Amino acid sequence: MGSPFTGKPSTLITNALPAHAAEPPNTVPAAPGPNTPYFVATAFNAYMSRPGAPSDYSGAKFDLRMMHPRPEQCWTAKCTALTKRALCDGLSWRNCTRLGMGSGETLQFRLGEDMDRVDIRWHWAYDGQWFTAEASEPATWVQKANERDRGDNMTVNTETVSFAKSEGWVFAWRSMVG
């Protein structure tokens, strides 16, 4: 996968260090760049039970990395959800966790209706002031013709619909307020 910083294979994406963000960004352009933090979701998996299935649980799991121009500012979080309610209602925020989260800091995700997008929200304090960064990216799912089909990313069977993205999924910060 190419880095949004250089277009060349990225070592930052595979070597993100867990650390508390020591300083907030000053400005947030519309897309990731050499001076802009952004999020990368990896190993994304989600599933929803189909009506009439023996289990009515749905869930999602992925790693979320905050990428920063200064590698010591990068961190990795785990995002998980398991619910009997609608997983993709476009309203419910689910928590992510990471080492070193500050008091009152939150990191959350939500899935759009019909899995059409993924939203990320990070709320943290720096030097006595609170900041919130938000990112959202559309999701494109193509149903597999059979289980061995490696090119597509949605599997439908009698009990569940499963969604998977193994590659890095870049989320540009759409807004940052503080």
Image (cartoon, grey):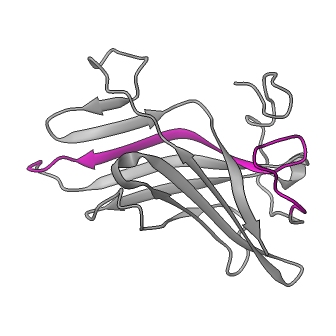
Q: Is residue 88 magenta?
A: no
Q: Quadrant of residue 152?
A: top left
Side of 20 relative to 172 (left or right) = right
Give the residue furthest to the bottom: 128
- Looking at the rendering, the stretch of residues picked out in magenta corresponds to 25-53
Query: What residue is drawn where x is 26% and y is 17%?
Result: 146
- Total numbered labels placed on residues in the image: 0
Could you tell whether 77 is left or right of 5 in the image? left
Say above or below: 14 vs 19: above
Residue ID at (76%, 49%) = 30
- Point out residue 113 in the picture as x, y percentages from the top left corner: 36, 54
What percent of the width, then of the height, locates residue 125? 79, 77
Q: Which residue is nearer to you in this view: 77 or 27? A: 27
Q: Looking at this view, name the residue that lies furthest to the front.
A: 30
Task: Name which residue lies at 78% across and 30% down.
Answer: 3
Relative to 20, residue 103 above or below: below
Q: Position of residue 25 (x, y in %)?
A: 87, 61
In the image: residue 110, left or right of residue 8: left
Q: Residue at x 56, y 61 (%)?
A: 96
- 94 w.r.t. 77: above or below: below
Image quarter hosting the N terminus: top right
Q: Residue 178 at x, y = what percent?
A: 79, 75
The image quadrant of residue 56 is bottom left
